Image (tube, rainbow, N blue to C red):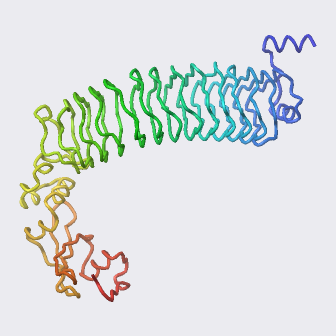
Amino acid sequence: MLVDTLKQIFGFGWGMTPAAARGAIVKGSAPPGTAVDIDLNLRGTSIHSLPDGLRVEGNLDLGGARNLRALPSRLYVAGNLQASACTSLKEIPGDAFVNWSVELRNCTALERIADGFNAQWHLALDNCISLKELPRELSVGGDLRLIHCRALTSLPRTLKVDGTLYLCHCPELRDVPAELRARHLVIENCPKLRSLGEDVHVRESLSIVNCPDLRLPDGLKIEQNLSLRESAVEELPYQLTVGGHLFLSNCRNLVRLGTWLEVGGTLDVSGCAKLQSLDGVMSAEAIDVAGTKITAVPPQLKKAHILWRGVNVPAHVAFDPASITVSEILAERNAERRRVMLERYGIERFITAAKTELVHADSDRGGERKLLRIPFSDDEPLVCLQVHCPSTGALYILRVPPSMRTCHQAAAWIAGFDNPADYKPLEET
């Protein structure tokens, strides 16, 4: 009895082989302080509890132990703790220590992680749908995954995440605390999230998707990239600073870029259909303006590269497509830039104005149709089918793959047929 007491007080474990420890734990006869020198696998067992002071010098696998209600006090795991799908587990004790990653995915009854607990590496809490409380001073050495945590309403005030913090599909989460520290922050589908704290510090990148009521604080600084793609944002905050790239593509409600916006890399506003001006932008290396109403850049951005869906183009190609000439398109040696110029000039207009080669001609119910070709020395040729609408007589020019050799083959391809012989339209409209 004295030996047992000393072992419990001073932490001397009951050294066991993994097989012996597994057998004793399953039978419920493992003593407090049980120690295993390597990995311990209890995956899928029907255990209800573990001995207090359990010490595992390798990895501890409890995955699918659906009857396990609690982890023991003073648990020590030198490797990883895998406890996913422990569906009866309700609480993680604050004195548990895991030296590497902690996997608690699909622990659907888990409500609380007690104060004092910290994760030395990754902590995964995906689908912990009952989780309401995290430790008040939680620190995570790697990534923290809070995904589909439906009951979670708040985060610890001083939460610190050295890797990426994922806040995704947390429908009751309302605020991100002011003193949050994270290397990367990903926020997706948190409909009640209203604000980021003014002192939030995200060291590298921030990505926000489908959080319609979320407002960014004035003076926010992101050291690397900020992504607000396809968000409902209407205006950016005052004095926003992004050290890397700012991605705002397809923000269809965006009408203003704020005041004193500084971007160290690319400013992507492509697809922001309501945006008319770059006023307020003080700096950017490149600006993607495809699909916007922007017609010019202000003086402070004259040195910025102009992009059209990621392709570097001359300013007039983006802002004044009517000034593009056929000879300019034909002389352009960069294939990607030439494709953009063709798009901006208009395929139909270009085919009409350029010297084309007739590949094939025949007729259909709409009248004469032609397969036309324009060769390029350093790229695949531009091939188009010229047809007339049978109902209105309107002329259409439709681009087809350069492998097309006949009008019928091209029409079959447009209709979705790989084999032209299968294309036998009774009537075309």
Residue 151 occupies which quadrant of the picture?
Answer: top right
**Residue 21: x percent and y percent?**
83, 31
Q: Residue at x 19, y 86 (%)?
A: 362
Q: Left or right of 237: which side holds 332? A: left
**Residue 220: x percent and y percent?**
33, 25
Residue 425 occupies which quadrant of the picture?
Answer: bottom left
Q: Residue at x 61, y 28 (%)?
A: 133
Front-most of residues 417 and 150: 150
Q: Residue at x 17, y 81 (%)?
A: 393
In this view, the residue farthest toward the right is 1
Q: Name the quadrant of the C terminus.
A: bottom left
**Residue 154: x percent and y percent?**
54, 29
Residue 127 occupies which quadrant of the picture?
Answer: top right
Q: Left or right of 58: which side holds 374? A: left
Q: Left or right of 276: which side holds 425? A: right
Q: Name the quadrant of the N terminus.
A: top right
